[in-house]
Image (spheres, rainbow, N blue to C red):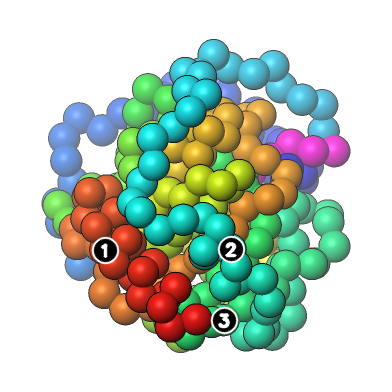
Amino acid sequence: MRTRTAALAAAAGAALLAPASFPAAAQQPSAEPVVKSPDEVASSGRGFSGAPRVPALAVPAAPASLPGEGSVRAADLLARTGSCRQISHGKFRTDDGARATVPVCAKRGAVFWKADMDIDCDGRPTRACNRRTDPLFFHATAFQQSDGRQLDAEHLPYVVVPGASRRWKHAAHGITGGTVAAVIHRGRVRYAVVGDTGPTDLIGEASYATAKALGIRPDPRSGGVDSGVTYLFFKGPKATPIESHRAAVARGEALARRFVRQN
């Protein structure tokens, strides 16, 4: 998984010493997404390969067999993402210090990439996602709920897209907050929304809830997987409101069926 730089390690140490903060009340609605500074974006990188493993926290174990989510099969989606028409101007790294090997690809009605999964716990502090459980925790997400509060990474399946750069601008391809994605791993399909942005050169990150739904260890310190995850983003109608997973599943199922028909 992603390697921490010395600067991030120092920031993580400071965060561990600081008390966890939990908002007392909901924030006022905000019409604009929170824009992270370059330092804040850089500090949201996940993963610890290249550094000693931190002992795993006690987190709920994923069930051996998870129920399906929708009727579109993983095999049908993967069959249509077997080849890549690259639309990014260059490739992305999955980990700090790794070679850039992951392109953003396009198919009719969708864009996709195949990468690892690092765990994003950013957003509203919860029992599983806060400064004590995640040294790199950041209290905001790029996109907010309909009531203005930050997204809840512990309970809402969302995906992180790279921040806009010359390499690739997600919004230019219709991928913004609330865009629905099918996330595929080991024959399982789970639907999520675009909820956050990350470093401009890294790819392959999703919320605690997304990982847990796929049977991937969601621990932000030591969880995730090194490869084998397909992120398929559907152009078109978004999930409304962004915080409704039920809306994401209903919208995702319809868009996934259309994607299979068109490709």
Q: Is residue 197 above or below residue 103?
A: above
Q: Residue at x 57, y 81 (%)?
A: 106
Q: Is residue 166 at least partly visible in the picture?
A: no
Where disc 1 sits, the SS reads helix
- Residue type pointed to by label 1: Arg
Q: Position of residue 184 (x, y in %)?
A: 54, 52
CB within 8 Å, label 3 to label 2:
no
Percent position (x, y) of residue 140?
Answer: 38, 48
Q: CA distance from mark 3 to mark 2?
A: 13 Å
Disc 2 vs disc 1: which is toward the camera? 2
Q: Residue 151, how many percent across, how many down?
A: 32, 47
* Disc assigned to residue 78: 2
Q: Residues within 10 Å of mark 2 (few under 14, many from 20)?
A: some
The x, y position of residue 54, in whole percent, is 71, 22
Residue under circle 3? 106
152 lies above or below 175: above
Q: Quadrant of the N terminus?
A: top right
Residue 253 placement: quadrant: bottom left
Which secondary structure, mark 2?
helix
- Report which residue position mark 1 lands on: 251
Q: Is residue 17 left or right of residue 239?
A: right
**Residue 206 vs residue 122, the one in the foreground:** 206
Query: Which circle's residue, 2 or 1, is located before the other in the chain?
Result: 2
Dot 3 or dot 2, earlier in sequence: 2
Q: CA distance from mark 2 to mark 1?
A: 19 Å
SS for dot 3:
strand
Q: What secondary structure characterizes most of the magenta part? A: loop
- Over which residues does the magenta segment extend? 44-50
Q: Nearer the viewer, residue 71 or 254?
A: 71
Amino acid at pointer 3: Ala
